[in-house]
Image: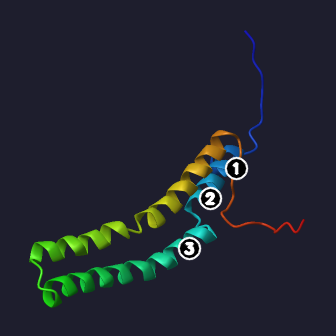
Amino acid sequence: MVSFQFKVTKVGSDTTLAQIIRLVEDAQGSRAPIQRFADVVSSYFVPAVITIALVAFGLWYLVLGKTFAFALTVAVSVLVISCPCALGLATPTSIMVGVGRGASEGILIKSGMRLRQHTE
């Protein structure tokens, strides 16, 4: 029978693995500057597009006398064509995928903020 003695120096949340997991979770939860920019743009873009769609509906239905169905189709077309879904959904999705892919390759991303700017 073979036996050995060992001394535990860190347990639970103090272990290196727990710290790595915490860093990855923090990186996934932090907001990169591009994500904040996308949120700001969306906060102005969405109300503007809804206003344009309502104006288009009113113009076609009330001013030009087209049918309700036609005017509604125009309004929905404006909403669908200018949908900011890609802007609002693609940014956080790409960050999550990038951090996860990096972790699977052994690269740990601590934050979405850049540390320094290279001037070369």
Residue occupying image coordinates x 31% and y 73%: 78
Residue under label 1: 108
Mark 3 in CB contact with mark 2 (< 8 angstroms): no
Dot 3 lies on which element? helix
Q: Quadrant of residue 106?
A: top right
Q: CA distance from mark 3 to mark 2?
A: 15 Å
Q: The residue under label 1 is which amino acid type?
A: Leu
Residue 85 percent across, percent down from the top left: 40, 64
Which residue is at the far right? Answer: 120
Q: Earlier in the sequence, mark 3 or mark 2?
A: 2
The structure residue drawn at horizontal position 21% and vertical position 87%, both measured from the top left corner, is: 59
Three-letter code for the amino acid on which mark 3 is drawn: Arg
Q: Quadrant of residue 26?
A: bottom right
Q: Are marks 1 and 3 in contact (CB under 8 Å)?
A: no
Query: Can you say whether 8 is above or below 21 in the image?
Result: above
**Side of 49 relative to 42 (left or right):** left
Please say if 25 is above or below 82.
above
Question: Percent from the top left, x then y, of residue 101?
Answer: 61, 44
The answer to whether the residues at label 2 and label 1 have Cβ atoms under 8 Å apart is: yes
Instruction: Say which amino acid is labelled 2.
Output: Ala
Q: Secondary structure at mark 1?
A: loop
Q: Which residue is mark 2?
A: 27
- Counting from the top left corner in percent of width and height, residue 8 is at 74, 39
Q: Which residue is mark 3?
A: 36
Expressed as whole percent of the image width and height from the top left, the position of residue 32 reads 61, 67
Q: Nearest the camera: 54 or 16?
A: 54
Q: How many marks?
A: 3
